[in-house]
Image: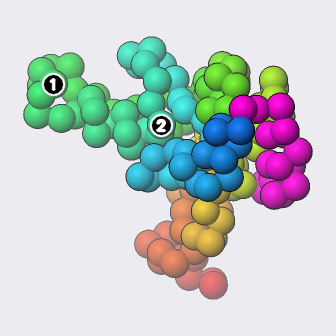
Amino acid sequence: MECSLKEHITTLSFAADESVAEMASGNYGCSHYRRRCKIRAPCCDELFDCRHCHNDSKNSLDVDPLKRHDIPRHDIKRVICSLCNTEQDVQQKCIQCGVCMGKYFCSKCNFFDDDVSKNQYHCDKCGICRLISFSYCTSLSVL
């Protein structure tokens, strides 16, 4: 699914000028993905920009080896809108302010990303979202 730029602009009209400028300039998300939401990790009930940020944090050398863990992408059930801070079930548009949290959204993987130039798609055979440029899945051999 994809949200339009018009939807981004119209839903931002209520926000403070600096928040709108920040969202419009691309200063949101993390080094892994550009998106307008954070995730609540069900395993530790903490907030992170994405599951990779969670995994980096929870698997660092500073963490007790017995407490290190990853979060499976399919386990993410709650997100927090980066614009209005409303916590909600995983979905593409915020239930409070209506902002599109990611132009690309996969409800199967609970995945959001504004960079649609990657040509992401959900591979039912793999069970996860993939980039069209990779060819490790046998279902891609027809491309």
Which residues lie in the magenta part?
Answer: 1-16
Residue 118 x, y percent position in the rendering: 58, 70
The residue indicated by pointer 2 is: 49
The residue indicated by pointer 1 is: 63
Q: In the image, is 84 to the left or to the right of 34?
A: right
The C terminus, quarter of image: bottom right
Which amino acid does the dot numbered 1 rest on?
Answer: Val
- Circle 1 crowding by C-alpha within 10 Å: few under 14, some 14–19, many from 20: few
Image position of 32 with respect to 96: above or below: below
Residue at 49% from the left image edge and 69% from the top image edge: 137
Q: What secondary structure is found at the residue carrying circle 2?
A: loop
**In terms of sequence position, does the residue under pointer 2 or pointer 1 come before the other?**
2
Q: What secondary structure is found at the residue carrying circle 1?
A: loop
Determine which of the numbered discs, if any, sits on residue 86 in the image.
Answer: none
Q: How many marks?
A: 2
Q: How far is the residue under mark 2 from the one under mark 1?
A: 19 Å
- Asked if one can make out residue 106 in the rendered structure from this viewpoint, the answer is no
In the image shown, does 50 or 36 lie closer to the viewer? 36
In the image shown, does 22 or 31 lie closer to the viewer? 22
Residue at 80% from the left image edge and 48% from the top image edge: 8
Residue 119 x, y percent position in the rendering: 63, 70
The N terminus, quarter of image: bottom right
Which amino acid does the dot numbered 2 rest on?
Answer: Asp
